[in-house]
Image: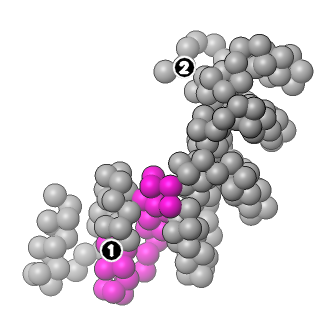
């Protein structure tokens, strides 16, 4: 619907705005069509509309959902060249891209870059990082998940039920309980959905 509306607006020479294009880029991202999202992004630029932080983040999300790390990283560089500051959503998108490609070393590198940019990873960021661990073989998966848990707790962030569920699947109940005792974090009440 949005696509048809934008195309009709263009044919009728009715000006569209960045929000309209952001909606289209986000819809393409959700449908897993990164190339179409990029085409709409370029189309917006050709109309001399300045992409917003949301525009760039939506395009990063489109590439992230496909595990296209290089393309997502290039969008982040373009964002910085446009003098826009990447935010938690930007970096979380890069971490998601690395996770989909099962690249734990790149997940860790992007977490480091995020923290160096004075941005605090949130539970969504760590959830994406743990998703990468779920794609790895043991013992690499468990070691990476433990490292992520330690990093999260050192930043004073407690795992929510969803993160605990992922940690349980990766580490197993004995190792998770041992870490809970060692690190002093509490079990979340209720069940993860």
**Left/right of residue 94 with respect to residue 151 in the rendered view:** left
How far across and how far down the image is residue 1, in percent? 16, 58
Asked whether 73 falls inside the magenta stretch, the response is: no
Residue 151's disc is: none
Residue shown at 48% from the left, 68% from the top: 56
Observer able to see residue 111:
no
Q: Which mark is residue 39?
A: 1
Residue 192: image tag: 2
Q: Which residues are magenta?
A: 40-68
SS class, disc 2: loop
Measured as percent of width and height from the top left, residue 8 is found at 11, 73
Question: Looking at the image, which is closer to me, 21 or 102?
Answer: 102
Q: Main secondary structure of the magenta part?
A: helix
- In the image, 7: left or right of 173? left
Residue 7's place in the image compared with 108, above or below, is: below
Nearest the viewer among 193 and 18 is 193
């Amino acid at each position: 619907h949005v696509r048809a509306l934008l195309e009709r607006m263009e044919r009728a020479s009715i000006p569209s705005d960045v929000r309209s294009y952001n909606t289209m880029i986000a819809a393409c991202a959700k449908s897993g069509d990164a190339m179409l999202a990029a085409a709409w992004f370029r189309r917006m630029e050709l109309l001399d509309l300045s992409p917003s932080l949301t525009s760039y983040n939506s395009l990063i999300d489109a590439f992230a959902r496909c595990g296209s790390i290089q393309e997502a990283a290039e969008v982040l560089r373009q964002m910085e060249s446009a003098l826009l500051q990447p935010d938690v959503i930007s970096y979380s998108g890069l971490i998601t891209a690395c996770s989909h490609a099962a690249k734990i070393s790149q997940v860790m590198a992007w977490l480091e870059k995020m923290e160096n940019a004075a941005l605090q990873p949130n539970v969504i960021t760590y959830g994406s990082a743990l998703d990468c661990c779920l794609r790895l073989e043991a013992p690499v998966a468990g070691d990476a998940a433990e490292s992520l848990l330690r990093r999260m707790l050192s930043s004073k962030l407690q795992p929510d039920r969803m993160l605990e569920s992922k940690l349980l699947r990766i580490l197993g109940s004995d190792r998770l309980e041992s870490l809970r005792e060692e690190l002093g974090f509490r079990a979340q009440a209720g069940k993860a959905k």
